[in-house]
Image (cartoon, rainbow, N blue to C red):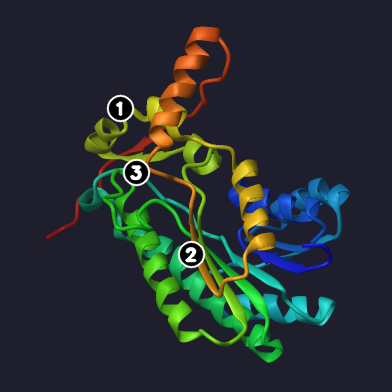
Amino acid sequence: MKDRIVVVTGSTRGFGYAIAEAMLRAGATVVINGRSKAALQRSLKSLQPLGRVTGFVCDVRRERQVYALARRVVREFERIDVWVNNAGYASSAGMIIETPPAQAIDMFLANDMGTVYGTRAALHFMFERKTGVLVNIYGNGSFLRPASPTALYGATKAWMASFTRSLAKEIAGSGVQLVGFSPGMLLTDMLTNPNVIGEKGRQMMKNYAFVLRLLGGSPQKAAEKLVRLLQSNHRPFVEYRGFRPWTPLLGLLRIAWENLTGSGKRPEFVMHVQPAYRPRI
């Protein structure tokens, strides 16, 4: 990754920040972005000791802002070697029919249309050079299993997987590599400060503490896996799954060991419960 120009969207916190950190440690030049200027400045200040990093304010829901971001990167660094479509979020946990439609719309704009805009921007410059790597971050729902209690978020990630697989077919032979990366359940702010819709949603989350302890992983370790994948991969299209069939079993063994030895730490979280949405029909 040394001296490669890497753009990571949605990277002022969470998994995006961890990716930026891991890329810098691997020697890359990193461009981060976020919606808030204050958050961008805080993240730049903490990342700068690790290497060459800069950042720009950009809302990936806004098409022209994403294209402007790509142009600024190329103007400053002459190229884009890796573009990571990471920006996105899960709005609330709960029943599909009790979640406000506005949340679903905003998630689709951020998670999916943000990926469309980022893909177009990155490929515009990568096609010219016939080289580059585009990374789309998958999530719960990507592999078409039920994603409740975050079903609407899961639907955006199912869309992401379908989009990425179709894109892989369309750009085959272009020289650009495409990676679909599913990091698994990560202990980021999105999971440690969950919003929950309605009483039924709260009931769906009754085992959340155990699930978080069982499956919650380190965003730093997942980011390091992404870096290693990019360093070693030579295939035009590859998908990576952080969650494997044996992941729950390994989690149970780890919990048993932690209980036996008194080691380990239970993830802390704060749940915010909101009233269910009732449409007028």
Q: Which residue is mark 3?
A: 93
Q: Does the rendering let one see residue 38?
A: no
Disc 1 residue type (three-letter): Lys
Amino acid at pointer 2: Ala
Distance of label 3 from label 1 (alpha carbons): 12 Å
Q: Amino acid at mark 3?
A: Ala
The local crowd at label 3, few if under 14, some if 14 to 19, many if 20 or more residues have their Cα within 10 Å, is: many
Residue 229: which disc?
none
Nearest to N terminus: mark 2 or mark 1: 2
Picture layout, residue 130 above or below residue 233 = below
Residue in view at x 60 percent, y 43 percent = 219
Which label's residue is closer to the chain start, 2 or 3? 3
| Residue identified by numbered label 1 | 206
Residue displayed at 45% across by 30% down: 250
Q: Is residue 100 left or right of residue 124?
A: left
Quadrant position of the N terminus in the picture? bottom right
Q: Secondary structure at mark 2?
A: helix
Nearer-the-camera pick, 11 or 160:
160
- For marks 3 and 1 on the same chain, the one whose residue lies earlier in the sequence: 3
Image location of residue 131, percent across then percent down: 68, 81
Marks 2 & 3, CB-CB < 8 Å contact? no
Quarter of image, res 148: top left
Q: Nearer the viewer, residue 198 or 111?
A: 111
152 sits to left or right of 166: left
Q: Quadrant of the C terminus?
A: bottom left
Q: Secondary structure at mark 1?
A: loop
Q: Determine whether, in the image, residue 232 is placed left or right of residue 249.
A: right
| Residue drawn at 29 percent across, 33 percent down | 202
